[in-house]
């Protein structure tokens, strides 16, 4: 009886490679947490994350079988599920419109201290290493979500 | 109430509204769409996917590098 063949993208060598990528991104997050905007460290750590994401997108297109399940594209939401939502999905665009509207109002209002935009709020959250590290990790998770859908 | 306090209050209210909608959708077990479901639907066509990924890239550069 033959042993089961590993699934595409799950061969031991590739698994080690993807583990290295994961550990690298974790290290990138730690360095990013300790960096400051407008510095080389901030530019490089952000660029590394962008390069990894673009690499995954390229592999999804050029060599999808080389990817482990965790970074493969998922199936889209089935049409029947979308039909069952009816008009209830409109709540999300409405909330997005509210966020964009309030952001624009704050953006054109002065002084900035009295009308903080989302960027200003984010700046205060990311001014310390723990907040910056958490925000960077959350950004990576959103990126993973975006490329796997 | 100052403008600054009011602005933070509105940002907080919007965050609570987003979390409430996501929680309600999660508890509805598929009867209501989650934010991820709507995003996935937006990203189904190639154009939508490109826009969302570019927005993610811009957000990261704007928030962490600049």
Image (spheres, coloured by chain):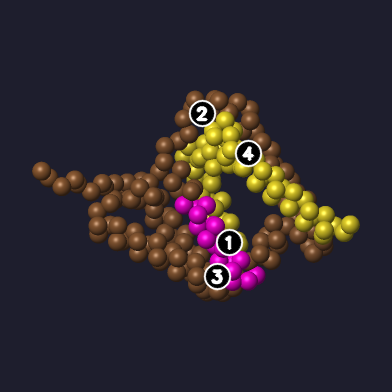
Indicate the chain on which mark 1 is placed. A
Q: Quadrant of residue B22?
A: top right
Distance from the alpha carbon under mark 1 to that under mark 3 = 9 Å
Q: Residue at x 34, y 59 (%)?
A: A18
Q: Circle 1 sits on which residue?
A: A135
Q: Residue furthest left?
A: A1
For mark 2, give the secondary structure.
helix
Decide if residue A144 is on the left or right side of residue B26. left
Q: Residue at x 42, y 37 (%)?
A: A75
Identify the disc placed on residue A81.
Answer: 2
Q: Circle 3 sits on which residue?
A: A33
Identify the disc placed on residue A50.
Answer: none
Q: In the rendered image of this protein, does residue A12 appear above or below residue A90? A: below
How many neighbours does mark 2 have within 10 angstroms: few (below 14), some (14-19), or many (20 or more)? some
Q: In the rendered image of this protein, does residue A140 appear above or below residue A37? A: above
Distance from the alpha carbon under mark 2 to that under mark 3 = 40 Å
**Highlighted magenta segment, given as a residue range:** A127-144
Q: Nearer the viewer, mark 1 or mark 4?
A: 4
How many neighbours does mark 3 have within 10 angstroms: few (below 14), some (14-19), or many (20 or more)? many
Q: Earlier in the sequence, mark 1 or mark 3?
A: 3
Residue B29: percent from left, percent from top: 54, 34
The tint chain A carries is: brown
Rendered yellow, the chain in question is: B
Q: Quadrant of residue A2?
A: top left
How many neighbours does mark 4 have within 10 angstroms: few (below 14), some (14-19), or many (20 or more)? some
Q: Circle 4 sits on which residue?
A: B24
Quadrant location, the N terminus of chain A: top left
Q: In the depicted view, which residue is nearer to us: A118 or A7? A: A7
Indicate the chain on which mark 4 is placed. B
């Amino acid at each position: 009886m033959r042993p089961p063949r590993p699934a595409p993208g799950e061969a031991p060598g590739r698994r080690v490679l993807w583990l290295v990528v994961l550990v690298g991104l974790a290290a990138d997050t730690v360095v990013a947490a300790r960096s400051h905007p407008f510095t080389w460290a901030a530019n490089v750590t952000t660029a590394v994350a962008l390069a990894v994401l673009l690499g995954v997108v390229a592999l999804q297109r050029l060599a999808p079988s080389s990817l482990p399940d965790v970074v493969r594209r998922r199936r889209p939401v089935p049409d029947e599920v979308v039909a069952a939502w009816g008009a209830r999905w409109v709540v999300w665009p409405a909330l997005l419109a509210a966020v964009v509207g309030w952001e624009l109002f704050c953006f054109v209002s002065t002084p900035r201290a009295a009308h903080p935009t989302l960027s200003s709020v984010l700046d205060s959250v990311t001014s310390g290493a723990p907040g910056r590290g958490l925000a960077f990790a959350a950004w990576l998770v959103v990126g993973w979500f975006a490329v796997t859908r | 109430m100052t403008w600054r306090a009011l602005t933070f209050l509105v940002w907080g209210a919007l965050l609570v509204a987003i979390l409430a909608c996501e929680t309600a959708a999660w508890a509805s077990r598929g009867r209501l769409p989650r934010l991820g479901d709507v995003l996935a639907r937006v990203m189904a066509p190639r154009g939508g996917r490109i826009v969302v990924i570019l927005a993610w890239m811009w957000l990261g550069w704007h928030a962490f590098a600049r």
